[in-house]
Amino acid sequence: MADERTSQADGTAVRVALWRAMHAEIDPPPHVLDDRIGLRLADPDVGWQHRPDMDPQVTSRVRATVVARARFAEDLVVARAGLGVDQYVLLGAGLDTFAQRRPRTAADLRVFEVDQPGPQAWKRRRLGELGYGPPTWLRLVPIDFETGQSWWEGLVAAGFDVERPAVVAANGLSMYLTRSANADLLRQAAALAPGSTLVLTFQLPLELVDADERPSRQATELAARTGGTPFVSFFAPPELVALALDAGFRDARHVSAGDLAARYFTGRADGLRPSSAEHLLVATT
């Protein structure tokens, strides 16, 4: 297991946590997600709001995307819990704070956060420092996706019940995986117990992104590549739906950025809306 004293937070995960916090701090209500705990967890330097990657106007659409995708997954978890689904898996969990923000809901579930060993060790330490030592129903599962280590086997070792259905969320993960790794992820998730649901975000090819957003998307790709975490996979919606069905899912559907805008941003005076570059796949077993 990674040494918590020497491990570091993942830069991308910190950036996402800060965008989520910015939504609660600078966007007018109603807030799609209020994640100020994530800000405490990230513990950024003073003046973090003035970082170039935090520019309120330039990052407004990606900020909307990260809160919408998290809210969508959490709404789905609550809906499925009402039907008896009591396992929630976050693949590439980063600095997600569902367990800390919604402890009453989470306490009725078994929540599994799967992430890279080093950043997850850092997160475990920070949770302890903030008084959020993981409760018995929260399992932190260290898995190195880059080595092909099986997240399925890691889940089972952590107490995941393969005979019971689950909601699995993979937000902000697919673009960092190769196409073959994404196909493997879909096949493994399709083997979950009947009644399980996978929520997977994915990046569109550049030509399918709204024209006014393409320069921003290209800048994001450049920053990711420079930071050592390049985007390597892009999917057109029908292509990914077909891959999910081929992997063995009973049903798969595409949730567009427009769908998220209609669901969470209708009627906002500030015009905030999610980016056209990232969409969702929802697949059920």
Image (tube, grey):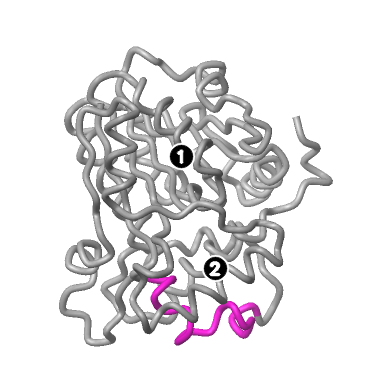
* Type of the residue with mark 2: Leu
- The residue that appears at 48% across and 30% down in the rendered structure is 184
Secondary structure of the residue carrying numbered label 1: strand
Q: Nearer the viewer, mark 2 or mark 1?
A: 1
* Type of the residue with mark 1: Leu
User: In the image, residue 1 lies at what x, y percent?
Assistant: 75, 29
**Cβ–Cβ under 8 Å for marks 2 and 1:** no
| Viewer-closest of 242 and 165 | 242
Using the rendered view, name the quadrant where residue 246 is placed: top left
Spatial CA span between label 2 and label 1: 19 Å
Q: Is residue 37 left or right of residue 88?
A: right
Nearer-N-terminus badge (2/1): 2
Residue 278 magenta: no
User: In the image, residue 112 lies at what x, y percent?
Assistant: 48, 32
Magenta span: 48-64
Q: Is residue 217 above or below residue 84?
A: below
| Residue that mark 1 sits on | 90
Image quadrant containing the C terminus: top left
- Mark 1, Cα crowd under 10 Å, few <14 / some 14-19 / many 20+, is many
- The residue that appears at 43% across and 68% down in the rendered structure is 206
Q: Is residue 66 left or right of residue 233?
A: left
Instruction: Check residue 18 in the rendering and tell me which mark sits there, or answer none.
Output: 2
